[in-house]
Image: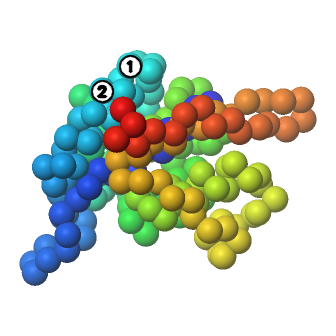
Amino acid sequence: MDLILWRHAEAEELGDGLEDPARGLTPKGERHARRVADWLNRFLPATTKVLVSPALRTQQTAEALGRRFKVVEALGPEGTVEGLLAAARWPDAREPVLVVGHQPTLGLTAAYLMTGPRLSHAQDGGLTPWTIKKGGVWWLRHRPRQDRGEVVLVAVRTPEQI
């Protein structure tokens, strides 16, 4: 199974009358989202399931793909590693899953998957979130191996690298 973690692109700052879920992308964020979406669309299979946080900035980031996506409450700014993995059906989904979400959840998920399940509760202080830059993508792949699976880092990209 492939799990692609895509952090939303640069968003507006919080201001008077603007609540966090309503923050949209800046013009720079829109450009970065399009750039990363173009790169993703070159490699993502047509069967990829796209899951998105309910925040406006994640939906705008995902819209750059030009694909259908599903808004999932568990992927919101206060989401957890466990909620993200359950929504993605990790590691059992038959199709690749692209999650458009937020820090620190994306960084905690990457750290948890790459360091192994021996760290059973990623949200309780067991891990420090790895940094995923705004607009950045981490592509992870689960490969079955005899009595256990392994996680392979397929790609890491930022908008500036594409």
Task: Answer with the quarter of the image where residue 112 lies.
Answer: bottom right
Name the foreground residue: 155 vs 86. 155
Name the residue carrying label 1: 42
Image coordinates of residue 100 in percent, x first then y, are 39, 47
Q: Residue furthest left?
A: 17
**Distance CA(mark 1)–CA(mark 2):** 7 Å
- Residue shown at the point (19%, 74%) measured from the top left: 14
Q: Secondary structure at mark 2?
A: helix
Helix, strand or loop at label 1? It is: helix
Q: Residues within 10 Å of mark 1 (few under 14, many from 20)?
A: few
Query: Residue under circle 2?
Result: 38
Q: Are marks 1 and 2 in contact (CB under 8 Å)?
A: yes
As rendered, which of 89 and 35 lies closer to the eye?
35
Q: Amino acid at mark 2?
A: Asp
Type of the residue with mark 1: Arg
**Residue 96 sits above or below residue 107 on the image:** above
Q: Is residue 90 visible?
A: yes
Q: Quadrant of the N terminus?
A: top right
- Relative height, residue 42 to residue 60 (above, below): above
Q: Residue at x 41, y 54 (%)?
A: 133
